[in-house]
Image: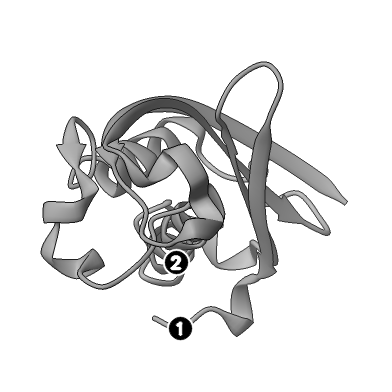
């Protein structure tokens, strides 16, 4: 399996609801390093997994609506606990959509799997990984 990974970062604020989250029930911020890995079984006709520039542009586009935002005020997340795992899945869906709609350029349709990793710190990270054909557009 071949893979290509791009990276960016976001800064967010949010608060969780419920005793389960302890002190994270209070408003707090996070700076996430975001890694997105694209997988394919064979390289495309250009001997790459995907165009790295287009992959990075698609990631920036996915992150733009949530970067420097209080996620509790973002309409599409109303009623959700915007955990690291939840955000990983949200970004996965955006990147899967980019692959399916051609925004990753020629060969993007050959991507079979994507993994999105959010690094909360040097001590903790979470990710969502899934097959592209199982992602809802």
In the displayed structure, would residue 109 be above or below residue 15? below
Q: Residue furthest top?
A: 122
Residue at 59% in and 20% down: 121
In the displayed structure, would residue 74 be above or below residue 63? below
Q: Position of residue 136 (x, y in %)?
A: 45, 83
Q: Which residue is mark 2?
A: 93
Q: Position of residue 56 (x, y in %)?
A: 41, 33
Q: Quadrant of residue 112?
A: bottom right
Q: If you read the primary sequence from the N terminus, does the residue marked by circle 1 or circle 2 appear first? A: 2
Q: Position of residue 109 (x, y in %)?
A: 55, 67
Q: Secondary structure at mark 1?
A: loop
> As drawn, is 36 to the left or to the right of 100?
right
Most foreground residue, 86 or 51 = 86
Most foreground residue, 25 or 107 = 25
Q: Is residue 45 visible?
A: no
**Mark 1 touches mark 2? (CB < 8 Å):** yes
Q: Residues within 10 Å of mark 1 (few under 14, many from 20)?
A: few
Q: Is residue 75 visible?
A: yes
In the displayed structure, would residue 122 be above or below residue 20? above
Distance Cα–Cα, label 1 vs label 2: 7 Å
> As drawn, is 16 to the left or to the right of 38?
left
Q: Secondary structure at mark 2?
A: helix
Most foreground residue, 58 or 119 = 119
Residue at 47% in and 52% down: 83
Residue at 43% in and 40% down: 24
Q: Position of residue 129 (x, y in %)?
A: 69, 60
Q: Which residue is mark 1?
A: 136
Q: Quadrant of residue 137?
A: bottom left
Q: How many marks?
A: 2
């Amino acid at each position: 399996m071949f893979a290509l990974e791009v990276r960016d970062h976001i800064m967010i604020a949010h608060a969780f609801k419920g005793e389960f989250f302890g002190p994270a029930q209070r408003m707090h911020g996070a700076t996430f390093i975001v890694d997105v890995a694209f997988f394919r079984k064979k390289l495309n006709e250009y001997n790459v997994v995907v165009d790295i520039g287009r992959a990075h542009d698609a990631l920036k586009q996915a992150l733009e609506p949530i970067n420097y935002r209080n996620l509790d005020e973002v309409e599409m997340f109303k009623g959700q606990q915007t955990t690291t795992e939840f955000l990983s899945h949200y970004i996965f869906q955006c990147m899967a959509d980019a692959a399916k709609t051609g925004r990753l350029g020629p060969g993007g349709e050959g991507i079979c799997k994507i993994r999105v990793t959010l690094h909360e710190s040097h001590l903790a990270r979470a990710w969502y990984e899934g097959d592209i054909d199982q992602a809802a557009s």
